[in-house]
Amino acid sequence: MSEATKRTEVIAVGNQKGGVGKTTNTVHLARALAERGKRCLIIDLDTGAHATTHLGIDPNAYLGMYEVLLGSEEPDSVLLSRDVEDRIDLPERLDIIAGSRKLENIDVALREIDTMMEPHRVLADPIAKLRGHYDYLFLDTAPNLTTPTIAAYKVADWFLLSAMPETFAIAGLDAALKDIDSARKRGNRNLKILGVVVCNTQKRTRLTRELLDYVDKAFTVQGSESKKFKTEIPRSTVVSSAQKVGKTVFETEPDHQVTECYRQLAAEVEGRINTYYQKLNDAQTEAASNA
Ligand code: ADP
Ligand code: MG
């Protein structure tokens, strides 16, 4: 691996619901950031391994997160990258560690190794080893609170939520907000909400308006802007067409509106993170000058 010189942002992508765009947004946001010159790694923590297949990789063909969580492989020995394996057709600067069906069995397997280990801490060591080598680490989580999902809440710097206008969208976001809050209280005080991506939107249907209203209310801290990203991702068949061939829309439809929206989203994400560090820096400077 490269020298550990980068400030790495660890972004967990979640929502208690399945089918709300977590994986699609993870893969495309990482792809858009890679296009902006940033080094990105997707860590696929889902038993469905959809992020892995979305990037054209057969999860059964490679070792991945299952082995890393068990401690039998180092993260850098299983990460897939176009630089490591020229058989792999990954975009430049976009690496992945594969998910696996085997993750369903992770709790039993962890207990067999060490009955005293804390399953919810299993990501701490692998993430610590990867920090410094990437600009962004994305943790794509399962739609339920499995051990790897909880471990992601415990280790991430940022939480990105994903929602689509549909019947239980608000309940899913509500549940995720509660979990973020308890992750903060229980050991990860550094966890911050990066924002909510509303995706798969069509025209302004009643469900869309309700979702947008809710997000604006629930994700606005008094005196600051809403955490909803201004960029919404419209519904389009280019998304599933790209998924079917194991590509992102950046490869299949580089000039499409959806692709352009993901570029804008990436700019918003970087803007928010930069603003955060700017404010932190200003506060530290002020504290130092008052000391
Ligand atoms: P999750 O990871 O939350 O389970 P996915 O990212 O797999 O959700 O998305 C669920 C489904 O929605 C997938 O079939 C995906 O193709 C589809 N989808 C996501 N975003 C869009 C979009 N902008 N337009 C059309 N379909 C979309
Ligand atoms: Mg998914």
Image (tube, rainbow, N blue to C red):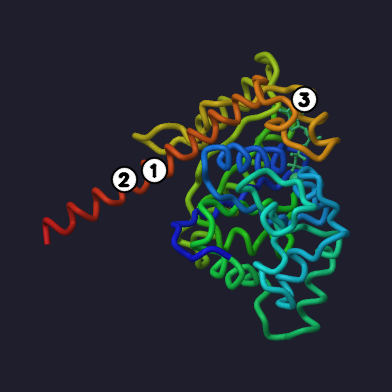
Q: Position of residue 140 (x, y in %)?
A: 68, 51
> Can you say which quadrant of the picture contains the C terminus?
bottom left
- Distance from Cα at disc 3 to Cα at disc 1: 31 Å
**Can you say whether 21 is above or below 69 in the image?**
above
Q: Position of residue 115 (x, y in %)?
A: 73, 85
- Residue beneath label 1, please? 274
Q: Of label 2 and label 3, which has the lower sequence position? A: 3
- Within 8 Å of ligand 1, the CB of disc 3? yes
* Snapshot quadrant of residue 46: bottom right
Looking at the rendered structure, the secondary structure element under dot 1 is helix
- Residue beneath label 2, please? 278
- Residue beneath label 3, please? 238
Q: Amino acid at mark 2?
A: Gln
**Can you say whether 179 is above or below 148 in the image?**
above
Q: Residue furthest left?
A: 290
Q: Amino acid at mark 1?
A: Asn
- In the image, what residue occupies the spot 79% across and 32% down? 242
Would residue 134 be found to the left or right of residue 5 on screen?
Answer: right
Callouts 2 and 1 close, C-beta under 8 Å: yes
Q: Amino acid at mark 3?
A: Val
- In the image, what residue occupies the spot 57% across and 47% down? 177
Looking at the rendered structure, the secondary structure element under dot 2 is helix
Q: Residue furthest front?
A: 86
Q: Position of residue 24 (x, y in %)?
A: 71, 38
- Within 8 Å of ligand 1, the CB of disc 2? no
Callouts 3 and 1 close, C-beta under 8 Å: no
